[in-house]
Amino acid sequence: MTEMHLPLEGKQVIVTRAQDKQAEAKKLFLAEGAKVLDLPALVITPPDRWDELDESISALDTFHWIIFSSSNGVLAFEERLQRVSKSLASSPATLKIAAVGRKTAQTLTKLGAFVDFVPPNFVADSLIANFPISGSGLRILIPRVQSGGRTILAESFLASGSEVVEVAAYQSCCPGTIPERTVQALIDSEVDAFVFTSGKTVAHSYQLLSKSLGSSLNIFLDGVKLISIGPQTSISCHKYFNRLDKEADTHDLEGLVQACINCFMESS
């Protein structure tokens, strides 16, 4: 009887995520046989000020749509709503909810909120291209990261005639340190792949590794597959590491795992 092997068996993978969201990605890679090294590359914190977010919450019944581009935005918005005894599950009947990706939609569903629209591809460009109605005359609320995120959603809806209110719901910062075990594995040439879940995880990983490995950083990445979750993350890979080996076809964690598997299959 032929022994079955998992597709990532024997591969050691560095996974970058927010500090409090490592477990989900790690579980998926472990299930395919990978050994996982953590690199928490984001710390989620409150925004510098709450006034604009609080103002939008008090006027929630004046908006036609609220658009979430991340689970972090959903959770931050819900937490602020609950401070005034409100919730997304009990949002005004006139307010529709859109989520850029499947995971963001799942976070909303877990909170009891109904998601009216999720685009076929889990990126902002797909939401814009497939939005179910014309933007003309709409009043749209977009809770987002305070700094560093894309503004394409707001720009596109403004161009189509919508009134758009963007508010900072959270901030994502670079951690102060990197796990020593992860750095040592790179030094010892024990890493097979480095997977990135957002443009900020790329930028912060580069910043953290540069502190530990200095200007010779790319020497330690020689032979390591660099894999991104989607188009904007890929742009950041080229910007900071000057290369990319594979981009996920579906822009979520499951797609990222499959991209990693495909990358090794293609190079074998």
Image (tube, grey):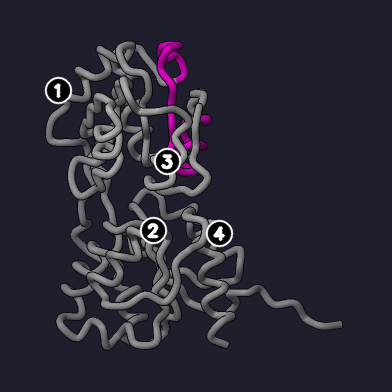
Q: Which mark is residue 28?
A: 4
Inspect the image, locate mark 2, and give the three-letter code of the amino acid beneath it. Thr
The front one of 189 and 59 is: 59
> Percent position (x, y) of residue 253?
49, 56
Q: Residues within 10 Å of mark 1 (few under 14, many from 20)?
A: few
The secondary structure type at the circle numbered 2 is: loop
Residue 66 is left or right of residue 57, and the answer is right
User: What residue did someone put label 2 on?
Assistant: 197
The image quadrant that residue 5 belongs to is bottom right
Which circle, 2 or 4, is nearer the viewer?
2
Which circle, 1 or 3, is nearer the viewer?
3
Position above or below: 57 against 12: above
Inspect the image, locate mark 3, and give the three-letter code of the amino acid beneath it. Leu
Question: Measuring 49% from the left and 41% from the top, which residue is drawn there?
Answer: 119
> Percent position (x, y) of residue 104?
45, 39
Question: Measuring 58% from the left and 74% from the top, which residue is drawn there?
Answer: 8
User: What residue did someone put label 1 on?
Assistant: 51
Q: CA distance from mark 3 to mark 4?
A: 26 Å
> Percent position (x, y) of residue 169?
25, 33
Span shown in magenta: 89-110
User: Residue 135 lies in magenta, yes or no?
Assistant: no
> Quick check: can you spot residue 27?
no
Q: CA distance from mark 1 to mark 3?
A: 28 Å
Which circle, 3 or 2, is nearer the viewer?
3
User: What residue did someone put label 3 on?
Assistant: 127
Position above or below: 10 against 90: below
> Quick check: can you spot residue 134?
yes
Q: Residues within 10 Å of mark 4 (few under 14, many from 20)?
A: some
Q: CA distance from mark 2 to mark 4?
A: 13 Å
